[in-house]
Amino acid sequence: MPLCLLNVRNDWSLEEVRQLFALPFMDLLFSAQKVHRRFQVPNTVQVSTLLSVKTGACPEDCAYCPQSVRYDTGLEAQELLEVREVAKRALSAKESGATRFCMGAAYRSPKPKDLAKVIAMIREVKALGLETCATLGMLTPEQASELKAAGLDYYNHNLDTSARYYTDIISTRSYQDRLDTLRAVRDAGMNVCCGGIVGMGETPEDRAELLHTLATLPVQPESVPINQLVRVPGTPLATAASLDPFDFVRMIAVARILMPRAHVRLSAGRGEMSDELQALCFMAGANSIFYGEKLLTTGNPDTAHDLRLFERLKIAAEPLDASAPGASATSSEVADRLSPPKTQELAAAPALT
Ligand code: SAM
Ligand code: DTB
Ligand code: SF4
Protein backbone atom coordinates (compact mmCIF):
# COMPACT_ATOMS: atom_id res chain seq x y z
CA MET A 1 0.00 0.00 0.00
CA PRO A 2 1.49 3.38 -0.93
CA LEU A 3 2.13 5.53 2.12
CA CYS A 4 1.41 9.21 1.86
CA LEU A 5 4.39 10.68 3.68
CA LEU A 6 3.56 14.33 3.20
CA ASN A 7 0.07 14.71 4.55
CA VAL A 8 -1.49 13.68 7.81
CA ARG A 9 -4.59 11.81 6.81
CA ASN A 10 -7.54 11.34 9.07
CA ASP A 11 -9.61 9.53 6.46
CA TRP A 12 -7.99 6.12 6.95
CA SER A 13 -10.34 3.26 6.21
CA LEU A 14 -10.53 0.36 8.64
CA GLU A 15 -9.44 -1.92 5.80
CA GLU A 16 -6.24 0.10 5.32
CA VAL A 17 -5.50 -0.22 9.03
CA ARG A 18 -6.07 -3.98 8.85
CA GLN A 19 -3.67 -4.17 5.90
CA LEU A 20 -0.96 -2.41 7.89
CA PHE A 21 -1.34 -4.92 10.72
CA ALA A 22 -1.15 -7.74 8.15
CA LEU A 23 2.22 -6.61 6.72
CA PRO A 24 5.27 -8.79 7.29
CA PHE A 25 6.86 -7.56 10.54
CA MET A 26 10.00 -6.14 8.90
CA ASP A 27 8.03 -4.35 6.17
CA LEU A 28 5.80 -2.77 8.80
CA LEU A 29 8.79 -1.66 10.87
CA PHE A 30 10.55 -0.26 7.82
CA SER A 31 7.47 1.75 6.79
CA ALA A 32 6.98 3.02 10.32
CA GLN A 33 10.63 4.09 10.59
CA LYS A 34 10.37 5.93 7.26
CA VAL A 35 7.31 7.83 8.47
CA HIS A 36 9.05 8.46 11.79
CA ARG A 37 12.07 10.04 10.13
CA ARG A 38 9.90 12.16 7.90
CA PHE A 39 7.79 13.63 10.68
CA GLN A 40 9.75 13.29 13.93
CA VAL A 41 13.26 14.02 15.18
CA PRO A 42 15.01 10.64 15.06
CA ASN A 43 16.83 9.32 18.12
CA THR A 44 14.94 11.68 20.39
CA VAL A 45 12.42 10.64 23.02
CA GLN A 46 10.09 12.84 25.05
CA VAL A 47 10.33 12.20 28.77
CA SER A 48 7.29 12.48 31.07
CA THR A 49 6.97 11.69 34.76
CA LEU A 50 3.73 10.46 36.32
CA LEU A 51 2.41 11.09 39.80
CA SER A 52 -0.76 9.67 41.29
CA VAL A 53 -2.23 12.71 43.08
CA LYS A 54 -5.29 10.78 44.28
CA THR A 55 -5.05 7.03 44.58
CA GLY A 56 -7.59 4.21 44.71
CA ALA A 57 -11.21 4.00 45.89
CA CYS A 58 -12.43 4.72 42.36
CA PRO A 59 -16.13 3.92 41.77
CA GLU A 60 -15.53 2.76 38.17
CA ASP A 61 -15.13 -0.91 37.27
CA CYS A 62 -12.36 -0.88 34.65
CA ALA A 63 -11.27 -4.53 34.62
CA TYR A 64 -7.57 -3.72 34.24
CA CYS A 65 -7.32 -1.19 37.04
CA PRO A 66 -5.88 -1.75 40.51
CA GLN A 67 -7.55 1.48 41.68
CA SER A 68 -11.16 0.37 41.33
CA VAL A 69 -12.90 0.07 44.70
CA ARG A 70 -14.55 -3.13 43.40
CA TYR A 71 -11.37 -5.22 43.33
CA ASP A 72 -9.28 -6.31 46.27
CA THR A 73 -5.79 -5.46 45.08
CA GLY A 74 -4.36 -4.58 48.49
CA LEU A 75 -3.82 -1.00 47.31
CA GLU A 76 -3.80 1.67 49.99
CA ALA A 77 -6.13 4.52 49.02
CA GLN A 78 -4.76 8.06 49.30
CA GLU A 79 -6.79 11.28 49.35
CA LEU A 80 -5.88 14.15 47.03
CA LEU A 81 -2.30 15.19 47.83
CA GLU A 82 -1.39 18.62 49.13
CA VAL A 83 -0.38 21.15 46.49
CA ARG A 84 3.00 21.67 48.17
CA GLU A 85 3.79 17.96 48.00
CA VAL A 86 2.92 17.82 44.30
CA ALA A 87 5.13 20.85 43.58
CA LYS A 88 7.99 19.15 45.43
CA ARG A 89 7.60 15.98 43.39
CA ALA A 90 7.39 17.98 40.15
CA LEU A 91 10.62 19.81 40.94
CA SER A 92 12.36 16.54 41.60
CA ALA A 93 11.02 15.14 38.29
CA LYS A 94 12.38 18.22 36.52
CA GLU A 95 15.75 17.83 38.19
CA SER A 96 15.83 14.22 37.03
CA GLY A 97 15.30 15.34 33.45
CA ALA A 98 11.55 15.10 32.79
CA THR A 99 9.99 17.85 30.69
CA ARG A 100 6.35 16.93 31.28
CA PHE A 101 4.65 16.19 34.58
CA CYS A 102 1.46 14.13 34.44
CA MET A 103 -0.92 14.13 37.39
CA GLY A 104 -3.30 11.18 37.63
CA ALA A 105 -6.35 10.94 39.84
CA ALA A 106 -8.61 7.93 40.40
CA TYR A 107 -11.86 9.77 39.69
CA ARG A 108 -14.86 8.95 37.56
CA SER A 109 -14.96 12.74 37.14
CA PRO A 110 -13.60 15.49 39.39
CA LYS A 111 -15.83 17.27 41.94
CA PRO A 112 -15.64 21.12 42.06
CA LYS A 113 -13.62 21.20 45.32
CA ASP A 114 -11.13 18.68 43.94
CA LEU A 115 -10.84 20.47 40.62
CA ALA A 116 -9.95 23.72 42.42
CA LYS A 117 -7.09 21.96 44.20
CA VAL A 118 -5.87 20.27 41.02
CA ILE A 119 -5.91 23.69 39.35
CA ALA A 120 -3.63 24.99 42.11
CA MET A 121 -1.31 22.03 41.42
CA ILE A 122 -1.27 22.78 37.69
CA ARG A 123 -0.28 26.41 38.36
CA GLU A 124 2.61 25.32 40.58
CA VAL A 125 3.90 22.73 38.10
CA LYS A 126 3.60 25.19 35.23
CA ALA A 127 5.54 27.80 37.22
CA LEU A 128 8.45 25.33 37.35
CA GLY A 129 8.66 25.49 33.56
CA LEU A 130 7.37 21.97 33.03
CA GLU A 131 4.70 20.93 30.56
CA THR A 132 1.58 19.93 32.43
CA CYS A 133 -0.68 16.94 31.88
CA ALA A 134 -3.57 15.60 33.94
CA THR A 135 -5.88 12.61 33.84
CA LEU A 136 -8.90 13.04 36.08
CA GLY A 137 -11.65 11.07 34.36
CA MET A 138 -14.61 12.56 32.52
CA LEU A 139 -14.83 16.34 32.12
CA THR A 140 -17.62 18.73 31.22
CA PRO A 141 -16.78 21.44 28.66
CA GLU A 142 -16.72 23.98 31.53
CA GLN A 143 -14.22 21.93 33.53
CA ALA A 144 -12.05 21.53 30.45
CA SER A 145 -12.03 25.30 29.95
CA GLU A 146 -11.08 25.88 33.61
CA LEU A 147 -8.16 23.48 33.27
CA LYS A 148 -7.02 25.14 30.07
CA ALA A 149 -7.18 28.56 31.73
CA ALA A 150 -5.04 27.25 34.61
CA GLY A 151 -2.29 26.31 32.14
CA LEU A 152 -2.95 22.63 31.52
CA ASP A 153 -1.13 21.67 28.32
CA TYR A 154 -2.33 18.06 27.87
CA TYR A 155 -5.31 16.05 29.06
CA ASN A 156 -4.98 12.26 29.08
CA HIS A 157 -8.16 10.28 28.55
CA ASN A 158 -7.76 6.87 26.92
CA LEU A 159 -10.24 5.02 24.74
CA ASP A 160 -8.39 1.91 25.94
CA THR A 161 -9.73 -0.51 23.30
CA SER A 162 -12.26 -0.83 20.46
CA ALA A 163 -15.83 0.35 21.02
CA ARG A 164 -16.90 -3.27 20.67
CA TYR A 165 -14.56 -4.76 23.29
CA TYR A 166 -14.95 -1.78 25.64
CA THR A 167 -18.19 -3.14 27.04
CA ASP A 168 -16.36 -6.31 28.17
CA ILE A 169 -13.86 -4.18 30.11
CA ILE A 170 -15.91 -1.32 31.62
CA SER A 171 -19.62 -1.12 32.37
CA THR A 172 -19.81 2.08 34.41
CA ARG A 173 -19.36 4.50 31.51
CA SER A 174 -19.69 4.30 27.76
CA TYR A 175 -17.35 4.75 24.83
CA GLN A 176 -19.44 7.76 23.87
CA ASP A 177 -18.78 9.28 27.34
CA ARG A 178 -15.06 8.98 26.59
CA LEU A 179 -15.47 10.57 23.14
CA ASP A 180 -17.51 13.42 24.66
CA THR A 181 -14.69 14.23 27.10
CA LEU A 182 -12.13 14.13 24.31
CA ARG A 183 -14.28 16.58 22.38
CA ALA A 184 -14.52 18.89 25.42
CA VAL A 185 -10.73 18.79 25.84
CA ARG A 186 -10.14 19.57 22.16
CA ASP A 187 -12.74 22.36 22.11
CA ALA A 188 -11.13 23.95 25.18
CA GLY A 189 -7.90 24.20 23.19
CA MET A 190 -5.83 21.63 25.09
CA ASN A 191 -3.61 18.99 23.56
CA VAL A 192 -5.22 15.57 23.56
CA CYS A 193 -3.36 12.56 24.99
CA CYS A 194 -5.35 9.45 24.10
CA GLY A 195 -4.40 5.85 23.55
CA GLY A 196 -5.10 2.41 24.88
CA ILE A 197 -4.03 -0.86 26.41
CA VAL A 198 -2.82 -3.97 24.61
CA GLY A 199 -2.93 -7.45 26.18
CA MET A 200 -6.43 -7.42 27.69
CA GLY A 201 -7.59 -10.40 25.62
CA GLU A 202 -8.65 -8.20 22.70
CA THR A 203 -8.40 -9.48 19.12
CA PRO A 204 -6.18 -8.01 16.39
CA GLU A 205 -9.38 -6.55 14.95
CA ASP A 206 -10.01 -4.67 18.25
CA ARG A 207 -6.52 -3.18 18.03
CA ALA A 208 -7.13 -2.11 14.44
CA GLU A 209 -10.46 -0.55 15.42
CA LEU A 210 -8.94 1.36 18.35
CA LEU A 211 -6.19 2.87 16.19
CA HIS A 212 -8.68 3.56 13.42
CA THR A 213 -10.90 5.48 15.86
CA LEU A 214 -7.95 7.51 17.14
CA ALA A 215 -6.57 8.26 13.68
CA THR A 216 -9.93 9.37 12.29
CA LEU A 217 -10.83 11.79 15.09
CA PRO A 218 -11.48 15.25 13.58
CA VAL A 219 -8.02 16.24 14.90
CA GLN A 220 -5.63 13.42 15.77
CA PRO A 221 -4.29 13.28 19.34
CA GLU A 222 -0.95 14.98 19.91
CA SER A 223 0.05 12.19 22.25
CA VAL A 224 -0.83 8.49 21.93
CA PRO A 225 0.08 6.29 24.92
CA ILE A 226 0.26 2.61 24.10
CA ASN A 227 0.13 0.64 27.35
CA GLN A 228 0.85 -3.03 27.77
CA LEU A 229 -1.53 -4.38 30.40
CA VAL A 230 0.08 -4.57 33.83
CA ARG A 231 -1.61 -7.67 35.27
CA VAL A 232 -2.34 -6.71 38.84
CA PRO A 233 -3.42 -9.52 41.20
CA GLY A 234 -7.01 -8.98 42.34
CA THR A 235 -8.18 -7.34 39.11
CA PRO A 236 -10.36 -9.36 36.70
CA LEU A 237 -7.53 -9.24 34.14
CA ALA A 238 -4.86 -10.53 36.52
CA THR A 239 -4.64 -13.80 34.61
CA ALA A 240 -4.98 -12.45 31.07
CA ALA A 241 -2.84 -14.38 28.58
CA SER A 242 0.54 -12.83 27.97
CA LEU A 243 0.95 -10.89 24.77
CA ASP A 244 3.27 -11.77 21.91
CA PRO A 245 5.82 -8.94 22.18
CA PHE A 246 5.87 -8.56 18.39
CA ASP A 247 2.15 -7.73 18.51
CA PHE A 248 2.94 -4.90 20.92
CA VAL A 249 5.59 -3.58 18.51
CA ARG A 250 3.08 -3.86 15.63
CA MET A 251 0.66 -1.68 17.60
CA ILE A 252 3.32 1.02 18.00
CA ALA A 253 4.30 0.83 14.33
CA VAL A 254 0.74 1.12 13.04
CA ALA A 255 0.07 4.03 15.43
CA ARG A 256 3.19 5.78 14.08
CA ILE A 257 2.10 5.35 10.46
CA LEU A 258 -1.49 6.45 11.05
CA MET A 259 -0.63 9.40 13.31
CA PRO A 260 2.73 10.64 12.04
CA ARG A 261 2.78 13.90 14.00
CA ALA A 262 1.82 12.42 17.35
CA HIS A 263 4.19 11.49 20.10
CA VAL A 264 3.60 7.75 20.48
CA ARG A 265 4.33 6.84 24.08
CA LEU A 266 5.74 3.49 25.12
CA SER A 267 3.74 3.62 28.36
CA ALA A 268 2.84 1.03 30.99
CA GLY A 269 4.50 -2.37 30.79
CA ARG A 270 8.10 -1.30 30.22
CA GLY A 271 9.03 -2.93 33.53
CA GLU A 272 8.37 -6.31 31.94
CA MET A 273 10.12 -5.54 28.66
CA SER A 274 13.70 -6.30 27.78
CA ASP A 275 15.94 -3.47 26.61
CA GLU A 276 15.93 -5.11 23.18
CA LEU A 277 12.13 -5.07 22.98
CA GLN A 278 12.07 -1.41 24.01
CA ALA A 279 14.64 -0.65 21.30
CA LEU A 280 12.34 -2.34 18.76
CA CYS A 281 9.49 -0.12 20.01
CA PHE A 282 11.64 2.99 19.44
CA MET A 283 12.50 1.63 15.98
CA ALA A 284 8.76 1.23 15.32
CA GLY A 285 8.21 4.89 16.14
CA ALA A 286 7.71 5.23 19.88
CA ASN A 287 9.18 8.56 20.97
CA SER A 288 7.94 9.18 24.48
CA ILE A 289 8.22 7.32 27.78
CA PHE A 290 7.22 7.58 31.40
CA TYR A 291 10.40 8.11 33.39
CA GLY A 292 10.55 7.52 37.11
CA GLU A 293 10.36 4.47 39.30
CA LYS A 294 6.57 4.41 39.56
CA LEU A 295 3.74 4.78 37.09
CA LEU A 296 0.58 5.49 39.11
CA THR A 297 0.50 2.52 41.47
CA THR A 298 2.75 -0.03 39.73
CA GLY A 299 6.46 -0.13 38.99
CA ASN A 300 8.45 1.30 36.11
CA PRO A 301 12.13 0.69 35.26
CA ASP A 302 14.50 2.51 37.57
CA THR A 303 15.90 5.76 36.30
CA ALA A 304 19.53 4.60 36.27
CA HIS A 305 18.51 1.76 33.98
CA ASP A 306 16.65 4.12 31.63
CA LEU A 307 19.60 6.52 31.52
CA ARG A 308 21.87 3.64 30.60
CA LEU A 309 19.42 2.47 27.91
CA PHE A 310 19.33 5.97 26.39
CA GLU A 311 23.13 6.04 26.46
CA ARG A 312 23.46 2.61 24.87
CA LEU A 313 21.03 3.52 22.09
CA LYS A 314 22.33 7.11 21.77
CA ILE A 315 18.86 8.44 22.34
CA ALA A 316 18.53 12.05 23.50
CA ALA A 317 15.78 13.37 25.71
CA GLU A 318 13.58 15.77 23.77
CA PRO A 319 14.18 19.30 25.08
CA LEU A 320 11.28 21.53 26.00
CA ASP A 321 10.18 23.74 23.14
CA ALA A 322 12.18 26.89 23.92
CA SER A 323 9.34 29.04 22.63
CA ALA A 324 6.76 27.41 24.91
CA PRO A 325 5.41 29.72 27.60
CA GLY A 326 7.12 29.00 30.90
CA ALA A 327 9.96 27.01 29.31
CA SER A 328 13.25 27.84 30.99
CA ALA A 329 16.87 27.33 30.05
CA THR A 330 17.28 25.33 33.22
CA SER A 331 14.75 22.76 32.02
CA SER A 332 16.64 22.26 28.77
CA GLU A 333 19.88 21.91 30.67
CA VAL A 334 18.32 19.28 32.87
CA ALA A 335 16.95 17.47 29.82
CA ASP A 336 20.40 17.62 28.23
CA ARG A 337 21.88 15.96 31.28
CA LEU A 338 19.60 13.01 30.74
CA SER A 339 21.46 12.06 27.62
CA PRO A 340 24.59 13.53 26.04
CA PRO A 341 23.87 13.84 22.26
CA LYS A 342 22.39 17.11 21.02
CA THR A 343 19.06 16.98 19.18
CA GLN A 344 20.32 19.19 16.34
CA GLU A 345 23.16 16.78 15.57
CA LEU A 346 20.78 13.85 15.64
CA ALA A 347 18.25 15.57 13.41
CA ALA A 348 20.93 15.75 10.75
CA ALA A 349 21.48 11.98 10.87
CA PRO A 350 21.03 10.36 7.45
CA ALA A 351 17.57 9.02 6.72
CA LEU A 352 17.11 5.29 6.61
CA THR A 353 15.40 5.31 3.22
N1 SAM B 1 -9.44 7.70 36.35
C1 SAM B 1 -9.00 8.33 35.19
C2 SAM B 1 -9.42 7.62 33.94
O1 SAM B 1 -9.67 6.44 33.95
O2 SAM B 1 -9.48 8.29 32.91
C3 SAM B 1 -7.51 8.57 35.14
C4 SAM B 1 -6.56 7.52 35.67
S1 SAM B 1 -6.53 5.96 34.80
C5 SAM B 1 -5.57 4.98 35.88
C6 SAM B 1 -5.51 6.29 33.40
C7 SAM B 1 -5.23 5.18 32.43
O3 SAM B 1 -4.30 4.27 32.99
C8 SAM B 1 -6.38 4.27 32.03
O4 SAM B 1 -7.20 4.85 31.07
C9 SAM B 1 -5.63 3.08 31.46
O5 SAM B 1 -5.42 3.24 30.08
C10 SAM B 1 -4.30 3.10 32.21
N2 SAM B 1 -4.19 1.93 33.09
C11 SAM B 1 -4.79 1.74 34.27
N3 SAM B 1 -4.48 0.53 34.79
C12 SAM B 1 -3.65 -0.06 33.92
C13 SAM B 1 -2.98 -1.32 33.87
N4 SAM B 1 -3.14 -2.21 34.84
N5 SAM B 1 -2.21 -1.60 32.82
C14 SAM B 1 -2.06 -0.71 31.82
N6 SAM B 1 -2.66 0.49 31.80
C15 SAM B 1 -3.45 0.82 32.82
C1 DTB C 1 -1.57 6.13 30.33
O1 DTB C 1 -2.00 5.86 29.17
N1 DTB C 1 -0.85 5.31 31.08
C2 DTB C 1 -0.58 5.89 32.37
C3 DTB C 1 -1.16 7.32 32.21
N2 DTB C 1 -1.80 7.27 30.95
C4 DTB C 1 -2.00 7.90 33.25
C5 DTB C 1 -1.09 5.10 33.47
C6 DTB C 1 -0.58 3.67 33.53
C7 DTB C 1 -1.07 3.03 34.77
C8 DTB C 1 -0.53 1.65 34.98
C9 DTB C 1 -1.05 1.01 36.21
C10 DTB C 1 -0.73 1.72 37.48
O2 DTB C 1 0.47 2.08 37.71
O3 DTB C 1 -1.63 1.92 38.29
FE1 SF4 D 1 -11.00 4.54 38.03
FE2 SF4 D 1 -9.51 5.40 36.02
FE3 SF4 D 1 -8.93 3.08 37.27
FE4 SF4 D 1 -11.07 3.22 35.73
S1 SF4 D 1 -8.94 3.47 35.05
S2 SF4 D 1 -11.00 2.32 37.79
S3 SF4 D 1 -11.74 5.32 36.06
S4 SF4 D 1 -8.85 5.11 38.14
Image: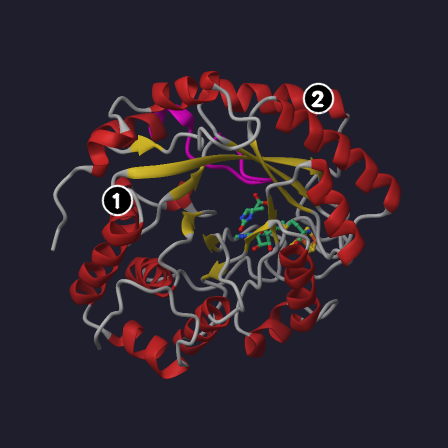
Image height of 353 relative to 209, above or below: above
Label 1 Cα neighbours within 10 Å, binned few <14 / some 14-19 / many ≥20: some
Closer to us: 142 or 268: 142
> Which residue sits at x=40%, y=60%?
242
Instruction: Tell me the residue that label 2 is attached to.
Output: 85
Instruction: Tell me the SS state at disc 2.
Output: helix
User: Percent x, y for residue 297?
Assistant: 60, 40
Q: Residue at x 35, y 58 (%)?
A: 260
Q: Which x, y percent locates residue 262?
A: 42, 53
- The magenta-colored residue range is 292-305
Q: Earlier in the sequence, mark 1 or mark 2?
A: 2
Q: Residue 155, position in %: x, y?
A: 62, 48
Place residue 24 in its image quadrant.
bottom left
Q: Is residue 152 visible?
A: yes
Decide: is 142 above or below 338. Answer: below
Q: Residues within 10 Å of mark 2 (few under 14, many from 20)?
A: few
Assign a secondary structure to mark 1: helix
Q: Amino acid at mark 2?
A: Glu
Residue 125 falls in image quadrant: top right
Which of the 4 quarters of the picture holds residue 9? Answer: bottom left
On the picture, is 4 further left or further right than 200? left
Q: Main secondary structure of the magenta part?
A: loop
Q: Which quadrant does the C terminus fall into?
A: bottom left
Residue to which mark 1 is pinned: 279
Could you tell me the amino acid type at mark 1? Ala
From the viewer's side, name the closer residue of 76 and 19: 19
- Residue 150: give x, y in percent of width and height: 72, 37
